[in-house]
Image (cartoon, rainbow, N blue to C red):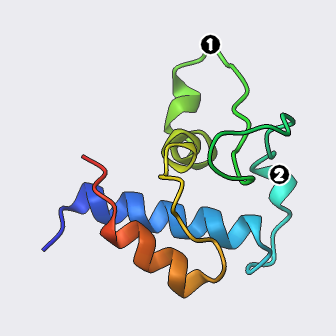
Amino acid sequence: MPSLELRRLQLDLLCCYKILFGLVDMDSSNFFKLTPVLKTRGRAYKLFKAHCPASVRSRFFADRVINVSNALPEETNFSSLAVFRQCIEKNDFF
């Protein structure tokens, strides 16, 4: 059985996917911005992380999930939610 930390991370990534691709009724620009650089390593869905000196912000969902999302392997498939879920369940985050 996966640890609570791993399950939370996987659910955060799934929620991030749903927000980015409009599967929930939320404006994705309130949470995330895609990186403005056109030449990203790996894939086109890299998220931009604004630098904020406050350590409190690091616990917010939007900031907590960006580093993990950007570190996903290149072979991660974003074609559908089910395929994305399978990809992140196979990934070793620790």
- State the residue position of label 2: 30
**Could you tell me which residue is drawn at 53 percent across and 48 percent down?**
65
Instruction: Locate residue 53: give its quadrant.
Output: top right
Instruction: Locate residue 90: give its quadrant.
Output: bottom left
Amino acid bearing label 2: Asn
* Image coords of residue 45 (percent x, y): 72, 54
* Image coords of residue 94 (percent x, y): 24, 46
Residue 60 in the figure: left or right of residue 1:
right
Instruction: Locate residue 11: give its quadrant.
Output: bottom left
**Could you tell me which residue is drawn at 74 percent across and 81 percent down?**
23
Task: Give the farthest residue toward the top.
Answer: 53
Instruction: Calculate the distance from the C-alpha at mark 1 to the C-alpha at mark 2.
Output: 20 Å
* Image coords of residue 20 (percent x, y): 75, 64
Q: Are marks 1 and 2 in contact (CB under 8 Å)?
A: no
Q: Which image quarter is the N terminus in? A: bottom left
Residue 22 in the figure: left or right of residue 63:
right
Residue 11 in the figure: left or right of residue 89:
right
**Could you tell me which residue is drawn at 86 percent across and 52 percent down?**
29
Q: Which numbered disc covers residue 53?
A: 1
Element marked by disc 1: loop
Amino acid bearing label 1: Pro
Q: Which numbered disc covers residue 81?
A: none
Count residues near mark 1 (Cα–Cα under 10 Å), then give few for <14, some for 14-19, many for 20+. Answer: few
Count residues near mark 2 (Cα–Cα under 10 Å), then give few for <14, some for 14-19, many for 20+. Answer: few
